Image (cartoon, grey):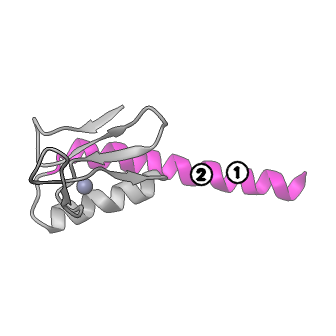
Amino acid sequence: MVYCGFTNGDVCMRTDADGAIVCISCSLSKRIESVFGGKIRTTMRFDTYREALNHLKEHRMKGDVVPNYAFNNLKLRAKKEEENKANTKNRQLWA
Ligand SMILES: [Zn+2]
């Protein structure tokens, strides 16, 4: 799943092969020394949609262009994620 890419803004966020949400070559990340020389940006990983959504907000606060559809998509997923967590909790209470 790709939430947004560099073609439509300053942020590239997608789901990686492990199912984690990643912000690729993130401008908010610490620059590290590349094995090829020079400094590069790293990829940030998020365990929840809520964390990823908050991260997009940070990008916007910094002045980065982030498309609205990325926000809307992650907002929906964060809401679902929290509903599922609440349902799981309820089920555990009644088990
Ligand atoms: Zn980022």
> Quadrant location of ligand 1?
bottom left
Instruction: Please give left or right for residue 27 compared with residue 20 in the image.
Output: left
The secondary structure that dominates the magenta segment is helix
Q: Position of residue 12 (x, y in %)?
A: 22, 43
Q: Amino acid at mark 1?
A: Asn
Mark 2 highlights which residue? 83
Q: Residue at x 48, y 53 (%)?
A: 48
Circle 1 sits on which residue? 87
Q: Position of residue 37 (x, y in %)?
A: 11, 50
The magenta-colored residue range is: 66-95
Q: How many marks?
A: 2
Q: Are marks 2 and 1 in contact (CB under 8 Å)?
A: yes
Residue at coordinates 31% horizontally, 60% vertically from top-left? Answer: 55
Q: Percent from the top left, x then y, of residue 88?
A: 72, 50
Check the image and name the residue furthest to the bottom. Answer: 61
How many residues crowd mark 1 within 10 Å: few (<14), some (14–19), many (20+)?
Answer: few
The relative height of residue 92 versus residue 5 in the rendered view (above or below) is below
Find out if the beta carbon at label 2 lies less than 8 Å from the nearest ligand 1 atom. no
91 left or right, relative to 70: right
